[in-house]
Image (tube, grey):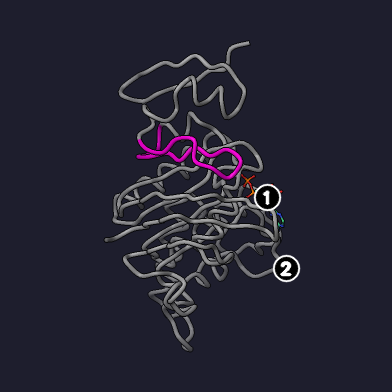
Amino acid sequence: MSGVKVRSLRFSYGKNIVLEDLSFEVDEGEILTILGPNGSGKTTLLKCLNRLLKPKGSVLIDSFEISKLNEKELAKLVGYVPQIHSPAFPYKVVDVVVSGRTPHLGLSIPTRKDYELAYDVLGRLGLSHLADKPYTQLSGGELRLVLIARALVQQPKVLLLDEPTSHLDLRNRVLVLKVLREIAREGIAVVMSEHDPNLASIFSDKVLLMCKGKIVGYGRVQDVLTRENIAKVYGVKVEIFERNGKRYMFPIF
Ligand code: ADP
């Protein structure tokens, strides 16, 4: 099977159980969005899928059990865009992006082709003008876009993104989600966390709604993002509208 298959995943920080018995699948070509209040375990889950944390249970990526892969094999399969990243050195943006090619390069240095790919991805994300800028001088939003570009040049089979739209204005949010939509169509499985249920509704094939480390709902937006589930998880009453097969939620006060 291509994509991600998770079975009975569990994780604890010491004695604090944070993820309980999670099972779900994301096929190549699909976007799965993880939703849930702060502290529900979204970041921890993404880190378990990237093996930054070692969970119990099974995580298969392209049918490989990730616990059995070496670092390089894993890096070729999985790209990860963390929520927080503090740049330490003033590398040029294009060099940061091209560093995403590392798993494919072995000990050799990046070639012209690698740089062409980096410029291509920067263009796709509307970042060409930043190519030569030191990445320590970027705004929070620009930095986020550059990290997404770096993950894209890695050409992984699975792309994990922790709140890829945070720090971004509405235009860039939509841009990023549109690019992720295109990337998914090219045959990548995308798993991301997102705070805005409306953006999740517009751009996802499936959603995973979490609360306190457990799955409250998993599947199609229409089945999971219901008034009842939103009230249960966020404690907020919403009105739901449908348009062109998409679902929109507005809080009611
Ligand atoms: P979310 O991404 O949904 O906000 P997190 O995965 O960051 O949730 O956190 C889930 C739970 O795990 C929270 O209760 C948080 O306090 C706890 N937690 C997160 N990181 C650590 C850590 N490094 N050590 C101990 N507990 C942690």
Residue at x 66% of width, y 43% of height:
39
Residue at x 37% of width, y 37% of height:
219
- Amino acid type, callout 1: Ser
- Picture quadrant where residue 4 is located: bottom left
Looking at this view, is 50 or 176 the one in front? 50
Relative to 189, say whether 87 is above or below. below
- Picture quadrant where residue 178 is located: top left
- Which is the main secondary structure of the residues drawn in magenta? strand
Instruction: List x then y, in percent, for residue 1.
Output: 27, 61
Instruction: List x then y, in percent, for residue 161.
Output: 51, 52
Looking at this view, is 182 or 41 the one in front? 41
Q: Which residue is mark 2?
A: 88
Magenta span has 68? no
Q: Secondary structure at mark 2?
A: loop
- Amino acid type, callout 2: Ala
Relative to 111, say whether 175 is above or below. above
Q: Which residue is mark 1?
A: 139
Q: Earlier in the sequence, mark 2 or mark 1?
A: 2
Q: Residue furthest front?
A: 15
Per the rendered image, the range of residues in magenta is: 202-219
Instruction: List x then y, in percent, for residue 194.
Output: 53, 40
